[in-house]
Image (cartoon, rainbow, N blue to C red):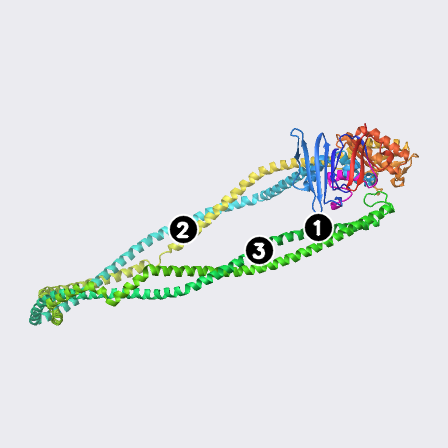
Amino acid sequence: MIPVNLKIQGFLSYKELVDINFEQLHLASITGPNGAGKSSILDAMTWSLFGYARARNDQVINQQSETALVVMDFEYEQQLFRVRRTKQLDKTQILEFYIRDQDAQQWRALTEHSVSDTQKRIQSTLRMDYDTFINASFFLQGKADQFTQLTPGDRKAILSNILGLEIWEQYLKKTKEIRKDLEFEKKRLESILFEIDKELADEEQLKIQLAQTQKDLVEKNKSKESHNLLIDQAKLLDSARVNAESQIKQQKSDIEKISSTLDKTRKRQHELSMQLEKLQNQVQNAAQIEENYKQWLQIRLELDELNKKSVVYQKAKQELINIQHEIDNEYKSLSTQKKFLDEKHIEIEQYKRTLPEIEQELAFFIKKQDEFSIFISNKQKLHEKIQNLQGEISARREKIRHLEHLNNEKREHLKEFRGAGPECPFCSQPLTQDHKQKYENLIIKEGVERKGIIEEENKLIEQFTKEINEARIELKKIEAIENESTLTQNQITERRVNKNHMQNSIDEWQKKQSSEYQTILQQLENRFFEEKYQSQMASLHQEIEEINFDEDKHSSFQQLENQLRGTEEKYRNLETARGKLEPITKQLTDLLGDIKNDEQELADKSEKLKKMQNEFEKLYANLPDILQLKKELDSIDIELSQISRRLGADKQRLDTIERKKVDKEKIQAELDQLIVAISRYQKLEEAFGKNGVPALLIEQALPEIEAHANELLDRLTIGQLSIHFETQSEYKDKKRQDKKETLDILINDANGHTRAYEMFSGGEAFRINFAIRLALSQVLAKRSGARLQTLVIDEGFGSQDHTGRSRLVETINQVKRDFSKILIITHLEELKDAFPGRIEVEKTPSGSQAEVIVYS
């Protein structure tokens, strides 16, 4: 990773935008006074790449800014990348990742859906995390001894990442996944074999069961044949029984027919006897019937003449009645129209009196509504005023919250600052009493100013709230006026409708109905409507006089004709009776002979029926029950079906067992192959594990790291110190013969004595750490295809004397060929010009500023 360009704004001590270009720098120092913002440049790098800096969350935001922004362009494996990270107050971070498309000359986004996923994408691209990065490339302030102070296990983890051994973890993960899949398949096959063995264990029992089922089938078929024979015999007997029953039924039917015929004949005989008696009575009164019949014929002739006159008379009389009805109807129609127009006339007179009053009321309400509209027109302006004031209140409350948050933050900041020792708790720079007092006074002054602003803003909020309440009171008044306006508008509408209705009614009366009213009054008063009927009525009265019809005589003849009308029927009946007497007498004699014959036949057939019934009882009393036999046969068929299914199922299971035997051989062969494969993958897991190939690679790399470190340490200490890496150590349990894996750092002095790291002075400890960390960076640059070609050293020179600093500078110059970019942070004046390039950092009122200086 080689930094190309860095943009910082609102981040830690950098308020305004600062753009730092690294392209012309190879070996350079970052210089400036304590607290100027030198280390913040490195914080910006680690924060942009990994989200880590000395400060966390909102603390990375400059105190006079609301947003922190860092954009870093860097080259990695001959490709140009850009990472952009921003953080706003009280909001989550925004992380963007890009790669430069050299052909299209534009940035192509690599950003994922979330910050965490984008962070994983960056770490995957760099193939390292934050801890590996700072151990291999960055000598951060206060963390020079980070690798030395780690546990042996953590050292091995960091070294694995530096050497690019994380690929073996991927191999191990993939191997475990394959092995687990194979073990799952092994368990599945073992389960199948277990089920197959369970089925094979039932084979002998199934064969015995099959033989018994076949025997049951033979016996049940014999039982079925026996029942079929019994049913056939029972059917023959039942057929004979049915035939005998049919004959008895026919005999009964014949008897019933004879009895019915005999009853009908006797009834007919009684009817003929009654007719004969009646005919004889009619013939006895023949003279009187004939006299009455002649009298009825004479009266009938005279009544026909009277009926003809009656038709003409009644027609003329009905026409007179109809004319009178028409006259009455016209009178009623005119009276109805007069009544309607009387009411209409009264209504019109009332409208004429009321119309001026309605017009006055309408004018009053229209004027009132116009006054309401003037008030209501202010409603929208009041709503807008309230909305604007509420927006002002929200903005000022947000400003107050921000200022109070700053005050609280500064109070905590000041509290921590007051409890600090000789070094600044935030930048670790030396802190004088004068500097401390000035900073404290500045914080207090800014706090008082912010408090004053808060008070002014609260006063404005109070004033705006008062104006809102006044506007809302006006709105309530307007709402009341709106309700009254609605009622007034209803009054206007109602009166306009009434006015239009009255005026239209008056106009219609004057144009048409007034003249109609006068015409109807004259018609009723003079009865002009009767004149058209007078001539027709006179003609009808004359016609009635000429007919000379006597209604009383006509009525008398009608009554007499009604009295004698039955004579005609009696005369006809007399003639009929005289013709029927002889035939009925002969018919009655024949019926008496038929009755005698039917009575004899009925007696004979009844006797024969009795004999047939006695014989039936003797022959068919104890017949076998066919229904019961059929039920038994159905049960046998059901049992046969069940036996057949059992037989088929047993045969199928035996066939399945034979197939399972073949399957078992195949599955057992697959299982044997799986066991071999699982064993091989288990061995691969051991090889890919931390004690396998990665451990061997670390052991191979350690001599090179150790040689580089000792070469550097020999140069820095003039041969006074050396180190040795120990990868195995004894267990505390002396009974154990094996050794545990470790990564211990042993330090030897000039006398060959091994001393603990804590026993060395600050300057010696720094040279030891510097040698080890620089050796790690060199090995990383050579072994990993130049994945990290940048070396950054933040401070550390202050612990060295003049000779020690000279040796460090000399050592850095000697290893510069191993790195594309080396940056050294220092506040020492004597080291400013020790390197060919420099980034000068200074603190200004608008925040830290940085300038790149390259010596020709």
The residue drawn where x is 82% and y is 46% is: 425
Q: Dot 2 surroundings within 10 Å: few (below 14), some, or many (20 or more)? A: some
> Percent position (x, y) of residue 150?
81, 41
> Percent position (x, y) of residue 698?
79, 34
> Percent position (x, y) of residue 83?
70, 37
Q: Is residue 56 magenta?
A: yes
Judge depth for marks 2 and 1 and give the one in front.
1
Find residue 579 and report its image quarter. bottom left
The residue wearing badge 1 is 399
Q: Which residues are magenta?
A: 30-59
Label 2 or label 1, whichever comes before in sequence order: 2
> Percent position (x, y) of residue 433?
87, 47
Gap between marks 3 and 2 measured at Cα:
105 Å
Q: Residue furthest right?
A: 751
The residue wearing badge 3 is 379
Label 1 or label 3, whichever comes before in sequence order: 3
Name the amino acid, label 2. His
The residue wearing badge 2 is 227
Whether residue 71 sits left or right of residue 558 in the image: it is right
Residue 738 in sight here: no
Q: Is residue 591 magenta?
A: no
Judge depth for marks 1 and 3 and give the one in front.
3
Task: Mark 3 and mark 2 in contact? Answer it, CB < 8 Å.
Answer: no
Badge 2 element: helix
Q: Which quarter shows the N terminus?
A: top right
Badge 3 element: helix
Whether residue 810 sits left or right of residue 76 in the image: it is right
Whether residue 59 sits left or right of residue 230 in the image: it is right
